[in-house]
Image (tube, rainbow, N blue to C red):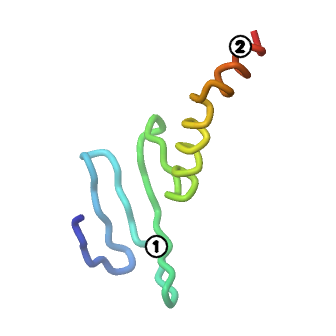
Amino acid sequence: MLALTRKKGEALVLNNNIEITILEVKGDQVKVGIQAPKDVSIYRKEIYLQIQKENEAAMTNEGIENLKKLF
């Protein structure tokens, strides 16, 4: 993991097309702005993990049977 220090208004650039800017710092909270192409998905980590869990559940036999019922 790369750890960087940034101040309000400073930014990071990822992969030449994603910019992450520190918008505000209040106590232990940091407000972050992300500018990225529309085809780049951006999720909070807890939401991303929930999506992964749901995708894994859909791949079980029960999930596959439920999909077959749709058609």
| Badge 2 density bin: few <14, some 14–19, many ≥20, Cα 10 Å | few
The x, y position of residue 5, in whole percent, is: 27, 78
Residue for point 43% across, 40% down: 40
Give the left or right position of residue 21, taking residue 46 as reference. Answer: left
**What residue did someone put label 2 on?**
68
| Badge 1 density bin: few <14, some 14–19, many ≥20, Cα 10 Å | some
Q: CA distance from mark 1 to mark 2?
A: 47 Å
Q: Residue furthest top?
A: 71
Q: Above or below — where is 28 with respect to 47?
A: below
Q: Amino acid at mark 1?
A: Leu
Q: Above or below — where is 17 with respect to 56?
A: below
Name the secondary structure under disc 1.
strand
Q: Residue furthest bottom?
A: 27
Q: Residue furthest front?
A: 61
Q: Which of labels 1 and 2 is toward the front? A: 2
Position of the C terminus by quadrant: top right
The x, y position of residue 17, in whole percent, is: 31, 45
**What residue did someone put label 1 on?**
23
Residue 67: quarter of image? top right
Residue for point 37% across, 61% down: 20
Q: Amino acid at mark 2?
A: Lys
Of the two numbered discs 1 and 2 on the same chain, state the one appearing first in sequence.
1
The x, y position of residue 39, in whole percent, is: 45, 34
Q: How many marks?
A: 2
Residue 60: quarter of image? top right
Q: Nearer the viewer, residue 38 or 47?
A: 47
